[in-house]
Amino acid sequence: MTRVVVVGGGVIGLAVGWRCAQQGWQTAVVDPHPGRGASWAAAGMLAPVSEATFGEDRLLALNLESARMYPDFVAELERTTGMEVGYRRCGTLMVARTFDDVAALERLHRFQLDLGLEATWLESREVKHLEPALHPSVRAGVLVPGDHQVDNRRLVEALAVACRKEGVEGIEGEVAEVEPGRGVRLADGRQVPADWVVVAAGWRSADLPGLGFRPPVRPVKGQLLHLRDDPRFPLTERTVRGFVEGRSFYLVSRGDGRYVLGATVEEKGEDLSPTAGAVYELLRDCIEVLPGAEELQLAEVVVGLRPGTPDNGPILGQVGPGLVLATGHYRNGILLAPITAEAVRCVIAGVPVPSEVEGFGPERFEEVG
Amino acid sequence: MEIVVNGRPQSWTGRVTVLEVVRSLLDDRFDGVAVAVNDEIVPRDEWADFELSHLDRVEVVTAVQGGDDEPLVIAGEKIGSRLIMGTGGVPSLEVLAKVLTASGADLVTVALRRVEPGARGSILDVVEAAGCRVLPNTAGCYTSRDAVLTARLAREALGTDWIKLEVIADERTLLPDPVELLDAAERLVGEGFVVLPYTNDDPVLARRLEEAGCAAVMPLGAPIGSGMGIRNPYNIRMIVEQASVPVILDAGIGTASDAAIAMELGCDGVLLASAVTRAEHPELMAAAMAKAVEAGRLAYLAGRIPRRLYAKASSPTEGVPEFG
Ligand SMILES: Cc1cc2nc3c(=O)[nH]c(=O)nc-3n(C[C@H](O)[C@H](O)[C@H](O)COP(=O)(O)OP(=O)(O)OC[C@H]3O[C@@H](n4cnc5c(N)ncnc54)[C@H](O)[C@@H]3O)c2cc1C
């Protein structure tokens, strides 16, 4: 029987582990703190369209395909676990505050239309009619009906349960060395034998001994806030992305009185400390666009490290015999979990990966010679 | 005696010939060099005998083949390109690497408050891998105190005395705060830094910064990231004409022609970021900027024709070549 060991139990490692076990492969997921990395910190937006930017067309295609897979992925997960993961088809409303922000949003919107994406321009009145919580000074918006969300914390918890149900061995421990084709060695000396090693250790994938190279993944710090209000009188029920004087924020409404306000993008290495400036700037910009946010309770300041790559795309594919990389998901790891798990399954089964995954292999980087 | 050489006043004592002025600029590399005094061309064989008088205007022009004239020199250091790149707004590290290569930049400025110098695989690594030198900046500082602290931090972390000094007045305009800026410049010069201040397009402030010991002055063409081009070319010209340190146009560039205009005005270099990093195709725009800076520089050296209201035939009517 094929034996697979997955290094890392974030959303990626757990989704991969679940899919592998479903194939009947003997699967283990190793992680000292499963589900408490970037996947715990994330906002859970599934937002291929509103995140689309110039020069990232292939990444957009990958994101769109994974978003398309989401409903089935979630339905299957909820069915096997009996848990609910907060997949909400709420759409996303992008709004612009000043004259300059409108110009920036217009440029993005033209780009969306050029790519044939589903998005609708809304004038000031229309946008406020749609979302009455917006400040009267908001000048325009773009409705992206297909950008949804999932409650990422519930998602990783459900994935962990699904893994257990499918017979995945969960090993609490840290991988000290990868031995491609043979398995992994843990920090406490234990050996986990396997034919295939899947590296899904998030930003720390770069430093795993035994790979023979250093995957070009770096930590990119992100801070966000968890906010609350009375679910009977919700501030908003969708995701609002605000553009304010050249900056931007998003407020994700979970629809039950919980909100996520994010996020910073900082090149600060392994730093995990929350900062006053981030809290201030996020709240200031959000309150300028949604004045009612002033009344929300501040429940938590969350800091996470995104696994960033040189071109912002994930690193998905086989490197050598018995070694697969599934890391570097940067800002879209929650969104990309379904297609990543499917791609890893295909690699190990020896069948072609989904066409959207082609070109995201490790070989595109020099470091992976 | 005061003479004006390439738009900049110089003092000489006693007798001075054209040859001496040219030597002071170019040593003995006279190939392709032409000289005009008060708009009259002076042939090469007359240089040694041509004595200059008080307030003469001397233009020393190098006819260059394809390349630039002489390198930009700041604080005694040769800089490999007159285009200096910023890193703000890059969509990815891969794009940054491509942009740096396409721009041909040698000096690249990085915001020390936004980048952890010790972080591996980050912006600083990309800049170094591209063969560029890092010029730390104090972006995000609102007070002289914060800017001085950030500069010290940069010196400690990166081992460089060079600092691009930014002290911002408010987040909306990102305009420099002149009072805090001058204060920080004085203090940093006092601490031995090579200070390159980002300043308003104010000739008086530029002069004060130079007097404070700054190694260059970097006036804005328009607010940072606005892409509005050079809103007050007359002030930029005044700054250029007064300065005896390099003048680098910093901020406001929106597209290639803006960069060319800066160079045509006599700036010694251009620093830009957003115009490239936020373009739809950053790498293409970086290549365009490199060409624009070079074209503008050559046009400046070549000396443009005066603007006229009425036409003037381009071929001489009387068969006599015209000079001047
Ligand atoms: C603030 C913020 C907001 C975000 N918002 C979104 C969003 O809205 N939508 C979206 O799609 N994405 C979002 N992301 C990105 C997303 O969170 C990541 O791309 C995704 O979580 C990456 O998943 P992962 O499993 O690779 O990493 P992680 O969740 O970090 O998991 C990696 C795991 O590997 C383990 N590990 C590390 N080293 C070892 C070792 N040696 N041995 C064993 N285990 C090891 C760690 O303990 C960790 O649990 C956001 C990220 C942040 C920080």
Image: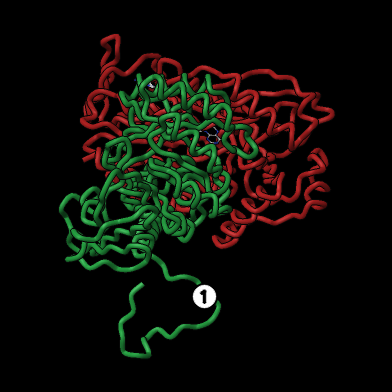
Chain colours: A red, B green
The location of residue A206, given as percent across then percent down, is 32, 28
Residue at the limit of the structure toward the top, as seen here: A188
Instruction: Report the number of numbered marks.
Output: 1
Q: Mark 1 points at which residue?
A: B308
| Residue at (25% x, 57% y) in the render | B18
At x 39%, y 28%, the residue is A203
* Badge 1 density bin: few <14, some 14–19, many ≥20, Cα 10 Å: few
Judge whether B25 appears above or below A188 on screen.
Answer: below
Q: Residue at x 33, y 25 (%)?
A: B158
Q: Position of residue B227 (x, y in %)?
A: 55, 52
Figure quadrant of residue A244: top right
Is residue A66 depicted above or below B117 in this figure?
A: below
Query: Does A138 sit above or below residue B143?
Result: below
Q: What element carries label 1?
A: loop
Q: In this view, does B23 lie to the left or right of A303?
A: left
- Quarter holding the C terminus of chain B is bottom left
